Amino acid sequence: MLQLRLLFVSILVYSGLFAQEKKGKTDFNVSFGTYVSTGDDLPFWMTANQNGVFTLQNSNYQLFQAGFAKKFESDSASNWSYTWGANLVYGYAGKSDFQANQYWFGMRHKWFVIKAGAQSDSIQYGGLSSTNGNLDRSNNARPLPGISLSTNNFIPFLFWKKWASFKVEYEEKLFSNHTFVKNAHLHHKSLYGKASLSKNWLVTAGLEHYVLWGGTSPTVGTMPSWSQYFNYILGLSAGPGAFIDDQTNKAGNQLGIYSLEIKKEWTKSIISLYWNHPFEDQSGLEMANLPDGLWGIHISKKDRSGFITDLAYEYMNTRNQSGSIRNLPAPTPDNPGRVTGRGKDNYFDHYIYRTFTYYNRMMGTPLFVPWIGEDGIANRLKSTRMWMHHFGIKGTCESGIYWKTMFTWSRNFGTYNDAFPADIFDPLGVGPYNPPLDEFSVLGELNYRGNKLPFEVNTGLAADYGERFQKRIGGYVGICYRF
């Protein structure tokens, strides 16, 4: 404990001096919060979408964070700009946990950006979305370390620069030993286009592609690595040396989303309509699972001093999964009568890589909760078929006092029957829930960020009621100092 305290003191002193040297450019913060619950663990919305800072299970949790960050200079005339930052976390819940949750360095030259390290995504839709507006990429898990190449947000597109722009991103990240398949990689790329249809209408559409690849599985051994890199990132079948199903199907665990947003600006408010459609294989790419996806609306008022400044509603459905017939290999010359199926996509789960998790937290929507095996590693997901209604509202009571509340109601159907081959997976209760499990989760927060105190005061209450989680009520109080 003494060494840990000395480390935090050193970080505070160094970061404070650094912030003074770069006054107005590097922000520093330190915070402490204490959390309590009537259950064995904290309520769902206390720990979900918190960048994976909660790693222990207990009815009492103490959380200390310290960090600093510098953003790119958006108004600079210089061709070069830099970003850096870090966030260190110490948690105590019967035992201690210390993590370097975020750490990154990046530089921009004109429109080109390169970053290295682990950094969370910026908050979207007023922080009211259940997934931060992205089914596959919420802030529920700890950021993965890696390297990324991208454009500096949207950039003008050739001759149509007055009304069209685009952005791209290409990333390679590493799981290390904190997932079922050790030292697996995560590849991610995205392409988005934006069109200005009129003065106040914007349409943004894009495609994101993720691949879990490489690594060593405790059940099937070592997977091919860089020698088959292009098979992975291009969605091709695996070559020799790979697991046989990867050779007849696709290399690695392939998944992604189609994304669409329509934004309209009025004099006093902005409304955004957004949609995510998931895919895991060819059937999803061809939208055989069209009923599935995330639909959302966010209304934001330009006057940020009103009692209500933001409203959000989301509906998510993942019950279709391209139908109830399992994906089967295509007919072959030796077996021309074999039936081909296209269903039971079982989102975010995979026969080799098991789950789309990091440090046991789902990297996509937090409504997908993993099983934790006896080895302490996420083994698979408890329920991948569900629908959800989610509401979020926030605003201000008076100068310096801010409030926020979220309500989520989900109905969970488990998985299709025999979603996994029995010779590869231990059952672990996988299959349909009969009857389905309903769950209601709520969160209410009240924060003071006025001028009378040199720090922020944060309080909140949360509760879960239903058949999926333990019935519980929790609360927290914390302080945060920024300079």
Image (cartoon, rainbow, N blue to C red):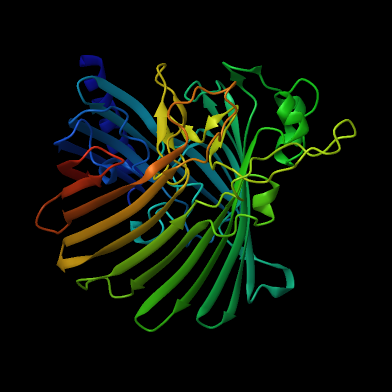
Residue 346 visible in rendering: yes
Q: Position of residue 401 (x, y in %)?
A: 15, 61
Depicted 292 relative to depicted 312: above or below: above
The residue nearer to you, when weighing 124 against 73, is: 124
Q: Position of residue 300 (x, y in %)?
A: 35, 71
Of all residues, the one furthest to the right in this rendering is 333
Depicted 373 relative to depicted 329: above or below: above
Residue 169 visible in rendering: no
Q: Residue at x 73, y 32 (%)?
A: 229
Asked where in the image residue 374 lies, by quadrant, the reply is: top left
Relative side of 329 to 352, left or right = right
Q: Position of residue 236 (x, y in %)?
A: 77, 38
Q: How many marks?
A: 0
Relative side of 226 to 378, left or right = right
Q: Residue at x 36, y 78 (%)?
A: 269
Of all residues, the one furthest to the left in this rendering is 452
Depicted 208 relative to depicted 172: above or below: below
Relative side of 155 to 55, left or right = right
Depicted 255 relative to depicted 78: above or below: above
The residue nearer to you, when weighing 77 against 307, is: 307
Q: Quadrant of the N terminus?
A: top left
Relative side of 246 to 367, left or right = right
Q: Position of residue 199 (x, y in %)?
A: 53, 83
Q: Residue at x 16, y 43 (%)?
A: 473
Q: Residue at x 86, y 38 (%)?
A: 336
The residue nearer to you, when weighing 230 against 244, is: 244
